[in-house]
Amino acid sequence: MFDAPLGDTESNETASRVDDVMQRIAEHKGCGTHGGSGKASCGSAAGQSDLAPEIWEKVKNHPCYSEEAHHHYARMHVAVAPACNIQCNYCNRKYDCANESRPGVVSEKLTPEQAAKKVLAVASTIPQMTVLGIAGPGDPLANPEKTFRTFELISQAAPDIKLCLSTNGLTLPDHVDTIAHYKVDHVTITVNMVDPDIGAEIYPWVFFKHKRYTGRDAAEILTERQMRGLEMLTERGILCKINSVMIPGINNDHLVQVNREVKSRGAFLHNIMPLISAPEHGTVFGLNGKRGPTAQELKALQDSCEGEMNMMRHCRQCRADAVGLLGEDRSAEFTTDKIMQMEVTYDLDTRKAYQDKVEEERQAKVAAKAAELESLAGELSDIEVLVAVATKGGGRINEHFGHAREFQIYELSAAGAKFVGHRRVDLYCQGGYGDEDSLETVIRAINDCTAVFVSKIGGCPKKDLQAAGIDPVDGFAHEFIEQSAIAWFKSYLDRVRSGEVVHAARGDASIRQGAFIAA
Amino acid sequence: MAYKIVASQCTSCTACEAECPNVAISQKNGTFVINPKKCTECIGYFDVPQCVAVCPVDDTCIIDTSVPRYQPRA
């Protein structure tokens, strides 16, 4: 029942493509591939013990910087920065759909004053909201007055909220001192290349010092400014995360070199994201038929870059006005019309009390995982499997299969359970109708998994999953994810040993590309 | 005597407004417009018109042929 090979030719092609990528990546010596049993669990899943205390203190409640935190804490983006100073072939600012979920897309732009009001309203409604980011929809540092005015207002009204921003880096060196002044201690730079010849295929132009530069010149200026900005930030002790868009056929191999360059300049976390590309987005890449990577191509690249540097695997590539836990978006509850009518009282004590409760729960989860992990000690099997988990947050298996809009992916081995990514399974937007068979979408998205953990599942999908070779597991409802996954894995190994199941390699899976229907 | 913005193409990203050396650009009915009385086509300031150079949508900031070209004073 566990060996359900993919028979169609497309999957075979995908598999050979993946082998090819893995082969090329394996040749890169700078970082190891899979974290073997002797290696501490790395990735942004890094916990307190893996990080320097001062870094842990900064990231422990930051959902975008800590995989561990993203189960418990929420973030919001305010769209105060519409202007941009570069053009990217994966971005089209003209395409603006309220149902679209991609970076660079927003429903409404805000003034700094509206943004500050919105932050207070959200922070009062969602006490676990600890992080405020400015991520566009353009570039925050191409709109420096609006960006820094927003930070100023929020740091006065809500001093406990962490500030961060995400930039293409072109004007970063000019603003590092201001960033330090407003105590923005998390900055993300999008770095897709360090080689201008590759950059010329990604960026048609940059606007720099009152002039538009194109081709190789544009990329040369951009990469020089990005690297200098990164160095200046790390010199000042500001934490830097690097975002890279994996564009198959352009920078997939090159990102290993990017990883090396940013690591050497002190970046703390590297987030390699899949290209989102479809003709209906109207982007250059979409119109030219550039495809995004498959789930296994992305994972192979992330694994290969995971040496001394933490890799982020939980990025949801969210909108520039997203609100809530990663993977959810409550922005519709906080439109400008609604927040302007809200009576907001900012209560630091209530927020603190709530966050203390979250912290208790979190410690319980860590302890449960540690206890379960001990029971794996001495396990010598070299079997590795991926499993999918339906969760609403809190680090527990607490979502019904049919209600899940995404699945979190864990890699199980003798070393334990490691978070390696997530798969969105929202209905696809097809000419305005979400009419695709949702079960097929789910199976395609988690096709590389051996099991799926849910709080509950109906009889029909259960049978279909089993037919596809995926074991639906509902025996750990409302339990902690990692503890349950390890317990299940032990019994899986026992069943393999006894011959009850045959362990077989799974195929590849697809990453959602279509537009997201929000409700 | 000036550039104009093709309203149907404008994304209202505000990039041109901040770059205009003449403060000739402002928001009107959701998109941006150039005041032809203030626009100097950036002559005397920059080698290229700044709104054209920074606009994310090609052929959106274009010469307004209904007014004569800007003539810098001697």
Image (tube, coloured by chain):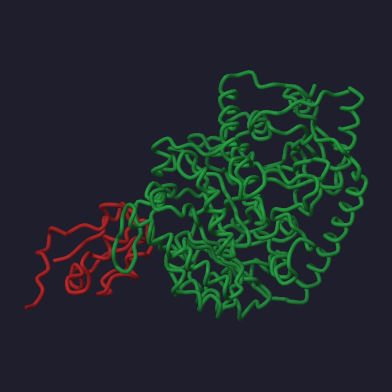
Chain colours: A green, B red
Q: Quadrant of residue A484?
A: top right
Residue B22 coordinates in the image, percent (x, y): 25, 74
Q: Is residue A66 left or right of residue B22?
A: right
In the image, residue A297 sits, relative to residue A460, either above or below, namely below
Identify the residue at horizontal 39%, vertical 38% (top origin). Answer: A287
In the picture shown, does residue A317 fall above or below A267?
A: above
Quick one: quadrant of the N terminus of chain A? top right
x then y, percent, for residue A295? 62, 38
Could you tell whether A517 is left or right of A390 in the image?
left
Q: Is residue B74 left or right of residue A116?
A: left
Q: Nearer the viewer, residue A267 or A247?
A: A267
Q: Quick check: A196 above or below B18?
A: above
Quadrant where the C terminus of chain A sits is top right
Using the image as rendered, state which of residue A46 and residue A367 is in the foreground.
A46
Q: Residue at x 34, y 55 (%)?
A: A205
**Residue shown at 82% from the left, 60% from the top:** A362
Residue at the farthest left position: B74
Q: Position of residue A99 (x, y in %)?
A: 53, 47
Q: Position of residue A40 (x, y in %)?
A: 78, 53
